[in-house]
Image (tube, rainbow, N blue to C red):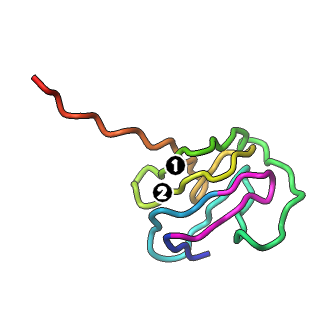
Amino acid sequence: MELKAGSRLRSAVSDAQVIVIRAPAGDVELTCGGVLMVEGDSDGGGQAVQPGSEGSVVLGKRYVDEDDTLEVLCTKPGEGALALGGHELGLKSAKPLPSSD
């Protein structure tokens, strides 16, 4: 699916929901718990977390891919690790503040 900034997605395996902050160009496969995420208002629940995709999505945290092309914000926590194209997303780290020497 092609992602756009502002899109709301939800997990098909848990209550997890995210908003896309920054999206790469073209079609991508964003998964939660090993299952493709669905549009925020569509029905696709009832599936189980796939083996190897265990984890959880934490409320208020931002997740990014290795290349920093995709950024999502968790708006509702849930089970299942987020992944883009089979590569797990990591928590976005805070930028260090400049020293005040």
In the rendered structure, which segment of residues is drawn in magenta?
A: 6-17
| Residue 82 locus on image (x, y percent) | 63, 50
- Residue beneath the point at 51% across and 48% down: 62
Badge 1 crowding class, 10 Å Cα cut-off, few under 14, some 14 to 19, many 20 or more, is many
Residue 52 to residue 14: above or below: above
* Disc 1: which residue: 63
Residue contact at pointers 1 and 2, CB within 8 angstroms: yes
Badge 2 crowding class, 10 Å Cα cut-off, few under 14, some 14 to 19, many 20 or more, is many
The one nearer the camera, 28 or 6, is 6
What secondary structure characterizes most of the magenta part?
loop
Instruction: Classify the position of the N terminus by image quarter.
Output: bottom right
Q: Which residue of the protein is positioned furthest toward the right in this rendering?
A: 46
Instruction: Classify the position of the C terminus by image quarter.
Output: top left
Magenta span contains residue 14: yes
Residue 10 vs residue 47: left or right? left
| Residue 88 locus on image (x, y percent) | 57, 47
| Residue 98 locus on image (x, y percent) | 19, 33
Check disc 1 and give the amino acid type: Tyr
- Residue beneath the point at 31% across and 39% down: 95
The one nearer the camera, 24 or 42, is 42
Disc 2 secondary structure class: strand
Magenta span contains residue 41: no
| Residue 3 locus on image (x, y percent) | 55, 72
Check disc 2 and give the amino acid type: Glu
- Residue beneath the point at 56% across and 69% down: 28
* Disc 2: which residue: 71
- Residue beneath the point at 53% across and 56% down: 72
| Sequence-wise first label, 1 or 2 | 1
Answer with the quarter of the image where residue 85 lies. Answer: bottom right
